[in-house]
Image (cartoon, rainbow, N blue to C red):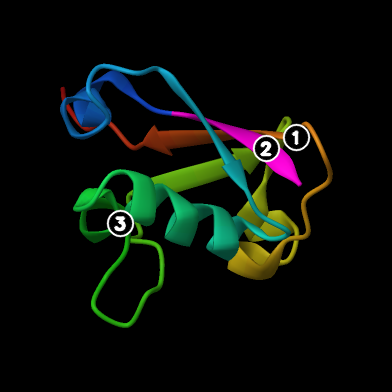
Amino acid sequence: MPVNVRIPSVLRNLTNGKETISVAAKTVDEALAALEVAHPGIRARLCDDSGKLRRFVNVFVGEEDIRFLDGQVTALKDGDLIDIVPAIAGG
């Protein structure tokens, strides 16, 4: 089932400048894996060596933070929008 992943500007150099990527996936983790197949190197920027999302990377399905759903195994439905939002620090 196709879902759309919105790529933050800081990672668009890995997606040839594309803001939104359509992938076939049933879970957030499958979407991340499909994103890696289409754009090698992006998963390493989002996940640690064990495959878990880095703590400074926030992922939303619709308007819901996956940390309050089922994490990376959060189920997706056709047409869902996944937003990847890296935390920004500063002061």
Examine the rendered structure and indicate whether residue 69 appears above or below residue 59.
below
Instruction: Find residue 64 and report its image quarter.
Output: top right
Could you tell me if the residues under marks 1 and 3 are in contact, i.e. CB atoms within 8 Å?
Answer: no
Q: Is residue 47 left or right of residue 10?
A: right
Question: What amino acid is labelled 3 in the image?
Answer: Arg
Q: Is residue 3 on the magenta stretch?
A: yes
SS of the residue at dot 1?
loop
> Which residue is found at the position 67% from the left and 69% from the top?
73
Q: Is residue 40 left or right of residue 35?
A: left
Q: Which residue is label 3 attached to?
A: 43
SS of the residue at dot 3?
helix
Q: Which mark is residue 80?
A: 1
Could you tell me if the residues under marks 1 and 2 are in contact, i.e. CB atoms within 8 Å?
Answer: yes
Furthest residue in direction bottom, as rendered:
50
Task: Give the magenta part as a residue range.
Answer: 1-6
The CA distance from mark 1 to mark 3 is 20 Å
> Which residue is found at the position 47% from the left and 54% from the top?
34
